[in-house]
Image (tube, grey):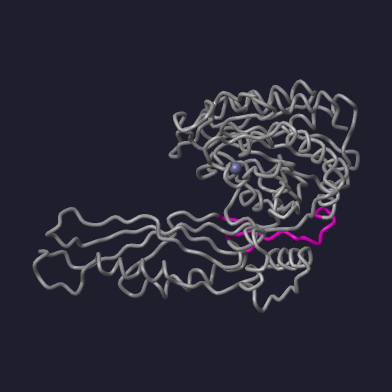
């Protein structure tokens, strides 16, 4: 059970981990080791035997196993990344790596994404060890490096090189789910992530005839690229409902007393008001042009022009995404994946069942401590480490419970300025996570 010590520890651990600056600037510029050592020490104090793993010096991952009472049961994985995105101190009200606790709120980079969850996991398993509690299923704990960049030094490395540590794991739990979403009219919704869109960052290359800018040129690479970029940016992607999004729309419609008319999803989204935000980014694929690079002088037509597009596709829709890009780019522009997430199921994206016993137990754990809340499934528009672990056959859910006050903009905290988390929210997280992991 989550005792007073567990409630105190989750706050201390969140604050301590924030103070260990694990900024990931990409390109390998990050050191997770001090945070990994901190987490490993807390596990070792509780009698666990954590393993430290590095593919690259200083990029440390930690894995440990808490043995359950039923050796025939499948194991669970709970994981959290140790790195954070950069923060500009000048923009913040408090120093982003101070871990300051002010008026019942813990401030700093990682307070929500996701040193809070790392701290919750530590507090829960330490309470179990203290009280002689054992969960039914083995619980594998993983703290990873490099989630905010390529995951090559983190979950990707663990999945590729250390699959044995995850033996028996069938389901995994990590960031972005079971938080309070206030709809503005008094309803409190707790979305649990049961799927992720796939990430496919695309590079476009247009080639043409390099020439003097004063001459007629029907093979202008810049013109060709611009036309393709315009077509991609303006494309209306067709509606595609995955099982998770279908369930989300049906349950939200019921909550608002609306008819779940899935033949008119855009109409339904309009009627859902603010709650539409939980689904609107995941009813279709998307491709947003984000970077352009061409030319070096105004009177010279370059032979090549390059653009980048942030592409995201729903589970099962990668082939359609590829075919659409073939069409939109046309014969004069080549495209390739510059970066593409790899997952085992539904190539590149994740789809997790919402009718499973495990999903029901997550729902029950939230409802026990937030009886006023309405649990609904949702699909994450972006991606997490869950995709890497899916290659080991592990079904991923976003479940890092937080009970948040009205007016607190959870979404804005991710990679945002003044990232912070209320102490009460951390306490709720420990209680719910403890209940769920013990009973799952
Ligand atoms: Zn994260």
Which span of residues is magenta-colored?
A: 342-359
The residue sitting at 36% across, 74% down in the picture is: 330
Quarter of the rendering containing residue 341: bottom right
Magenta span contains residue 111: no
**Looking at this view, is 407 or 192 the one in front?**
407
Which of the two residues, 350 or 182, is positioned nearer the viewer here? 182
Q: Quadrant of residue 271?
A: bottom right
Magenta region's main secondary structure?
loop
Residue at 74% x, 51% y: name it.
190
Residue 327, quarter of the rendered image: bottom left
View extreme (front): residue: 185
Side of 82 where 362 appears, left or right: right
Residue 109 placement (x, y as % from top left): 56, 33
Residue 260 left/right relative to 228: right
Q: Quadrant of the N terminus?
A: top right
Q: Position of residue 96 (x, y in %)?
A: 53, 29
């Amino acid at each position: 059970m989550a005792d007073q010590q567990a409630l105190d520890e989750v706050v201390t651990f969140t604050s301590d981990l924030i103070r260990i600056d694990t900024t990931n600037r990409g390109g390998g510029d990050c050191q997770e080791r001090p945070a990994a050592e901190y987490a490993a020490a807390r596990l070792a104090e509780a009698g666990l035997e954590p393993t430290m793993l590095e593919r690259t010096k200083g990029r440390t991952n930690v894995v440990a196993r808490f043995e359950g009472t039923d050796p025939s049961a499948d194991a669970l994985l709970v994981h959290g990344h140790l790195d954070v995105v950069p923060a500009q101190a000048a923009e913040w009200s408090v120093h982003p790596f101070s871990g300051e606790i002010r008026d019942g709120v813990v401030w700093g980079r990682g307070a929500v994404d996701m040193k809070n969850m790392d701290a919750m996991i530590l507090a829960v398993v330490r309470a179990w060890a203290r009280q002689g509690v054992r969960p039914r299923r083995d619980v594998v704990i993983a703290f990873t490096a490099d989630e905010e960049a390529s995951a090559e030094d983190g979950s990707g490395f663990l999945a590729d090189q250390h699959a044995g540590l995850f033996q028996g794991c069938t389901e995994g739990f990590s960031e972005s789910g079971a938080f309070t979403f206030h709809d503005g009219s008094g309803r409190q919704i707790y979305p649990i992530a049961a799927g992720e869109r796939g990430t496919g960052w695309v590079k476009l290359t247009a080639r043409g005839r390099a020439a003097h800018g004063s001459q007629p040129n029907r093979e202008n690479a810049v013109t060709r690229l611009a036309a393709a970029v315009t077509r991609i940016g303006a494309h209306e992607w067709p509606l595609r409902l995955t099982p998770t999004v279908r369930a989300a729309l049906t349950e939200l419609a019921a909550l608002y007393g609306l008819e779940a008319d899935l033949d008119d999803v855009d109409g339904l989204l309009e009627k859902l008001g603010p709650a539409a935000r939980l689904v609107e980014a995941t009813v279709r694929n998307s491709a947003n042009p984000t970077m352009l690079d061409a030319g070096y002088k105004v009177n010279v037509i370059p032979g090549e022009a390059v653009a980048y597009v942030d592409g995201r596709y729903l589970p099962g829709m990668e082939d359609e995404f590829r075919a659409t890009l073939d069409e939109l780019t046309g014969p004069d522009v080549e495209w390739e994946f510059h970066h593409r997430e790899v997952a085992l199921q539904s190539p590149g994206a994740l789809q997790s069942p919402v009718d499973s016993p495990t999903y029901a137990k997550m729902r029950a754990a939230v409802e026990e401590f937030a009886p006023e809340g309405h649990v609904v499934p949702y699909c994450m528009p972006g991606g997490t480490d869950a995709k890497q672990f899916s290659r080991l056959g592990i079904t991923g859910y976003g479940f890092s419970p937080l009970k948040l006050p009205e007016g607190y903009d959870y979404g804005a905290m991710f990679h945002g300025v003044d990232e912070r988390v209320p102490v009460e929210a951390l306490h709720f997280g420990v209680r719910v996570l403890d209940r769920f992991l013990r009973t799952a």
